[in-house]
Amino acid sequence: MYLQLVSLRAFALLAVLLAVPASIAGAASAGSIKVQVVDERGVPVRDAVIELDSPSAMKTRITFPWRMAMAQKDEAFVPGTLVVARGSTVAFPNLDRVRHSIYSFSKPARFEIDLYGRDQSRTHTFPVSGSVALGCNIHDKMRGYIRVVDTPFAGKTDANGYVTLSGVPAGTARLTVWHPRIRTPSGEVVKQVNGATDQKISVRLR
């Protein structure tokens, strides 16, 4: 009788496992990948944008935990580099005592925002993926960058050159490193990686 009960329980457990939806099974196989970016001397590269494009990833709305905003503070863009999903609307609040006028001549987003003052804000939508360099018509030293991505697996490196991407599906994927100083025409380095395998990538900087 005891053996029969155990067999029935085992059969029931097997039935439950076989009934698990494919989406849940896929999520169970997801992991994280830690990427470090260094220059040719081995020095960590800060604010390098890492993107992972996986053919096995589920197509969902892309969201990130940080604010879709780039302020002007102390006559600088803060943060200096911002990662946003394609189609995002970014706010540009002015936290300075002086007025600013934002512009970009980059192919993915050519636009200009007229002068506006302290505690005012303007917005712009970015429907095309790619790299957008920003400037201010009033303050030539101001430089900012927006990287518009098509993947939820994206982020930028910290002061030690590291970023961790979570929920990465297993299997091969394309990993892109972007930084405005990388010595390539696009500012990118691209390589194929195997799922959630940690990476250390060396780049040449201008």
Image (tube, rainbow, N blue to C red):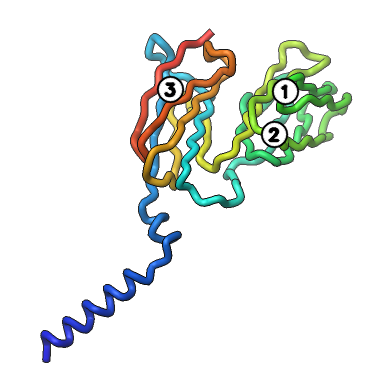
Q: Residues within 10 Å of mark 2 (few under 14, many from 20)?
A: some
Mark 3 to mark 2 CA distance (whole Å): 26 Å
Q: Residue at x 65, y 33 (%)?
A: 129
Q: Residue at x 49, y 21 (%)?
A: 189
Q: Residues within 10 Å of mark 3 (few under 14, many from 20)?
A: many
Decide: is 130 above or below 150.
above
Residue picked out by circle 1: 107
Give the residue type at disc 1.
Lys
Nearest the viewer among 69 and 149 is 149
First reached walking from the N terminus: tag 3 or tag 2: 3
Q: Quadrant of the C terminus?
A: top right
Q: Nearer the viewer, mark 3 or mark 2?
A: 2
The location of residue 93, given as percent across then percent down, is 77, 33
Q: Residues within 10 Å of mark 1 (few under 14, many from 20)?
A: few
First reached walking from the N terminus: tag 2 or tag 1: 1
The location of residue 61, given as percent across then percent down, is 61, 50
Element carrying mark 2? loop
Nearest the viewer among 122 and 194 is 194
Element carrying mark 1? loop
Q: Quadrant of the N terminus?
A: bottom left
Q: Residue at x 36, y 52 (%)?
A: 29
Labels 2 and 1 touching (C-beta < 8 A):
yes
Residue 128, disc: 2
The location of residue 127, given as percent across then percent down, is 72, 37
Residue picked out by circle 3: 37
Give the residue type at disc 2.
Val
Give the residue type at disc 3.
Val
